[in-house]
Amino acid sequence: MVKYKQNETPLLEAMHKYVADGALPFHTPGHKQGKGMHPAFKELVTEVGLAMEVSLMEELDDLHEPQTCLKAAQDLAAELYGADESYFVVNGTTGAIQAMILAVVNPGDKILVPRNAHRSVISGIMLSGAIPVFMQPEIDEQLGIAMAITPEIVVQTVADHLDAKAVLVVHPTYYGVAADLKKIATIVHDHNMLLIVDEAHGPHLKFHDALPMQALDAGADLVAQSTHKILGSMTQSSLLHAKKARVDIERLRAMLSLVQSTSPNYLLMVSLDVARMQMATEGKALLARAVELANWARVEINKIAGLYCFGAEKMAASGAYTLDVTKLTVTVKALGLSGAEAEYILRHKYGIQSELSDVYNVLFIISYADRKSEVEKLVNALKMLAESHGNLAGKIEKQVVVYPVIPVAKLSPRQALFASKKTIAFEEAKDKICAEVITFYPPGIPIICPGEVISQEVIDYCLKMQEVGLKVIGPTDVTLKMIKVVNILEE
Ligand SMILES: Cc1ncc(COP(=O)(O)O)c(C=O)c1O
């Protein structure tokens, strides 16, 4: 196979070549390279883009058995990130996480996972039939958010579950906080377990020394990255990286095939090829600008009375070892506003859309695409928010949030998924086995998972989260008036 360089894009090249060849399309997709596409959609994508929106041509390789241009594009990603193998994933990091979990655990095997894992981790566990052992991350009481899993918690949980097969960590968290992953990798490997990492928020870490160390460099065996979240690929396209030493690569490939379409979208895949080339050629300069802008914004935000944007000063605890400074978590509680209220005002009064809000905070992502003028607008909007909407003598105490302890599990998530169920009033669900995930999203931390016993504490916490306006994701009834529980007759 031709050896490509990092400034090349083998998949893009192959797609151009196929279109230039001009073969008459008696093949899928039905729009026939844009010809039949309705004008309402045609407006959204260029003619060239639609002509390239093809599938399964021999020149364009096969995601499920890549040998030519897709293999070359994936190999370039592996080379850039320092993996032995990298894979394009068209079902987001959700698909990559499911494949990673399926690749390392059998039904009944234990896997250690943080309680603040994204719900895709829970779905991966359900698919695999594994038994999750949850690790509680440190909670920063001032910020009201979960930090990273500490090496100490990993040591303790691994020691309590020496039969576990793998440890999954989120690195960094949604808020950009990272633990000492190198230390965690050593602990995990010393116990013959695999370290798999949800690095959804870390595809850019490699390109700036001031950012937390990327998981592959810290010793992770499998790493899933949402290239689309932080870098330049299209939404839904992610990368999965593997180190061969401990991973059964054949099994990993089979699991990736299991969770991915047989008709992967080439525009999604080529966006990964181009995003990789962009980072290889300009990544360091682009990330230098993003880091500088974020550092500037952090200083400016911290000058605004009533706002706080945490930075290096929080990086003293073991659950907060290093920070991705491009994540700006602005704590608004001193204004007497909830994060959700501040998010709403910023969106509807000042035209600023944040990434997420929680009880105390609003999170803004500065990426390689941002410029000074946009970040200045953000800082100005925050100034106006603080001046016009804050009530510095406000209702801070009302919003105290303490995450509930992890409930006791009576069934595995998979057993609960397939069990017979009934729907009852949520407020009367105490002591019942939950059949659904309840997550307040963002930030996507499951409060209760299928198979766990609903405690009064969980009920009270959920009601409080709803009171401050956070959106419930997971249960069939998103108003959370009703909940599905497992129908155990002899209970
Ligand atoms: C920490 C984390 N992991 C995984 C995912 C899933 O990623 P994707 O949206 O690419 O499927 C998300 C999405 O928000 C996330 O925040």
Image (tube, rainbow, N blue to C red):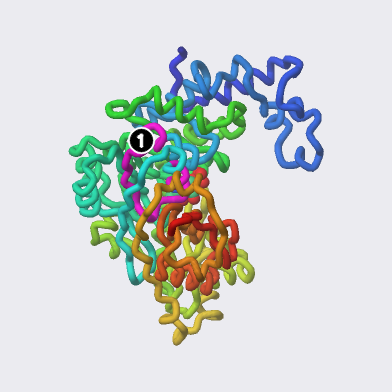
Farthest bottom residue in view: 393
What's the residue type where badge 1 is placed?
Val
At horizontal 49% and vertical 84% (from top left) the residue drawn is 391
Q: Is residue 192 above or below residue 133?
A: above
Left or right: residue 373 versus residue 303 is right
Task: Kindly tell me whether residue 365 is visible in this rendering.
Answer: no
Residue 76: x and y in percent read 43, 26
Left or right: residue 265 versus residue 275 is right
Residue 473: x and y in percent read 54, 57
Q: Residue 150 falls in which quadrant of the image? A: bottom left
Q: Is residue 66 above or below residue 80?
A: above
Label 1 CB, ligand 1: below 8 Å? no
Residue 415: x and y in percent read 44, 45
At horizontal 40% and vertical 25% (from top left) the residue drawn is 251
The residue that disc 1 covers is: 105
Give the camera-side residue of 357 and 120: 120
Q: Is residue 113 magenta?
A: yes
Left or right: residue 360 versus residue 178 is right
Give the camera-side residue of 185 and 314: 185
At horizontal 47% and vertical 80% (from top left) the residue drawn is 336
Question: For the image shown, how many numbered marks are present on the structure?
Answer: 1
Give the camera-side residue of 345 and 338: 338
Residues in magenta, as a range:
100-124
Q: Is residue 320 magenta?
A: no
Q: Residue 447 falls in which quadrant of the image? A: bottom left
- Residue at disc 1, secondary structure: loop
Task: Kindly tell me whether residue 267 is visible in this rendering.
Answer: yes
Farthest top residue in view: 1
